[in-house]
Image: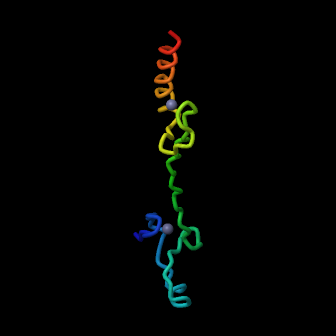
């Protein structure tokens, strides 16, 4: 059994393509049963989605360090509500 180092596919159908190597000097895998050169199935890495960062309008909007995720803002905004409530009294 030959294993592709690039994509990790291993199959008894795969063999190193000697003819291709003789012609090009490069090794590639050949799928004997399909009679086609092996094509790597590279899994697309799921990139972690960057959380959307927002700036609290009640804080300094110019301050990039105050950027927070929406989840953080949901909690953060209560600090302003409390503050406003306190002033209203
Ligand atoms: Zn491969
Ligand atoms: Zn704020």
User: Is residue 40 depicted above or below 62 in this figure?
Assistant: below
Q: Residue at x 47, y 14 (%)?
A: 86
Of 54 and 28, which appears nearest the observer? 54
* Total numbered badges shown on the rendered structure: 0
Of 58 and 18, which appears nearest the observer? 58
Q: Position of residue 1 (x, y in %)?
A: 40, 69
Q: Position of residue 41 (x, y in %)?
A: 53, 62
Of 49 and 58, which appears nearest the observer? 58
User: Is residue 58 depicted above or below 25 in this figure?
Assistant: above
Q: Which residue lies most toward the left here?
A: 1
Q: How is the image coloured?
A: rainbow
Q: Residue at x 55, y 68 (%)?
A: 33
Q: Position of residue 24 (x, y in %)?
A: 55, 88
Q: Position of residue 52 (x, y in %)?
A: 55, 41
Q: Residue at x 51, y 51 (%)?
A: 46
């Amino acid at each position: 059994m030959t294993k592709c180092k690039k994509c990790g596919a291993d199959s008894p159908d795969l063999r190193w393509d000697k003819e291709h190597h003789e012609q090009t000097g490069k090794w590639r895998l050949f799928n004997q049963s399909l009679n086609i050169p092996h094509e790597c199935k590279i899994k697309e890495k799921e990139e972690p989605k960057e959380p959307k960062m927002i700036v609290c309008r009640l804080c300094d909007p110019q301050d990039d360090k105050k950027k927070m995720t929406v989840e953080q803002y949901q909690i953060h905004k209560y600090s302003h509500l409390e503050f406003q409530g306190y002033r209203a009294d």
